[in-house]
Image (cartoon, grey):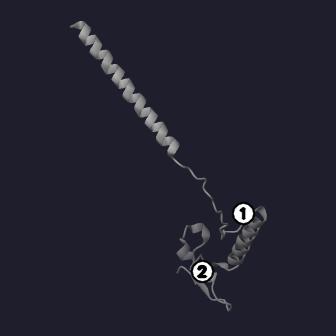
Amino acid sequence: MKKNNSIRRKIIKITIVIFVLIFIISLFKIYQSIEVEKPSYNTTRTLYTKSEQTVENETEKSQKIVDMIEETTKKVVGISKLKSTGSTLLTGASEKDLGLGSGVIVTQNGYILSNE
């Protein structure tokens, strides 16, 4: 009985090995039959809308920003009352009591826009 079991196990092992070999050989045949064509890549040049980032371009942008800030700060003004209500800066009165503030010149003839 032990001999029969041993022979059956050997037959099963040999059968499994044969099936695995057949499977591997069939995969190899399938692999060989695959035709691979070399792709033909067509390259196209796309337009990039943003300008190149160079030192000169960045310097030019920075100069534009500086010019804009200078132009804007020329229009900022300080506002203060001409007539005093009896308070001084040393009494601790508020800005509103003292008439202090700031504004921006908005027209050529001098109109000032403030938060009051």
Q: Secondary structure at mark 2?
A: loop
- How far from the left and from the top, in percent, is residue 89? 61, 70
Residue drawn at 29 percent across, 13 percent down: 7
Please provide percent x and percent y for residue 78: 65, 77
The type of residue carrying mark 2 is Ser
- Which one is nearer the viewer's eye here, 54 or 13? 13
Q: Position of residue 44 (x, y in %)?
A: 66, 66
Q: Amino acid at mark 1?
A: Gln
The image shows residue 99, relative to residue 38, as above or below, that is: below
Residue contact between numbered discs 1 and 2, judged by CB atoms under 8 Å? no
Image quadrant occupied by the N terminus: top left
Question: From the viewer's perspective, is the residue at label 1 or at label 2 nearer?
Answer: 1
- Residue at figure coordinates x 37%, y 29% from the top left: 19
Residue 15 as seen in the image, left or right of residue 55: left
* Residue that carries the numbered disc 2 in the rendered image: 84
Question: Helix, strand, or loop for circle 1?
Answer: loop
Quarter location, residue 74:
bottom right
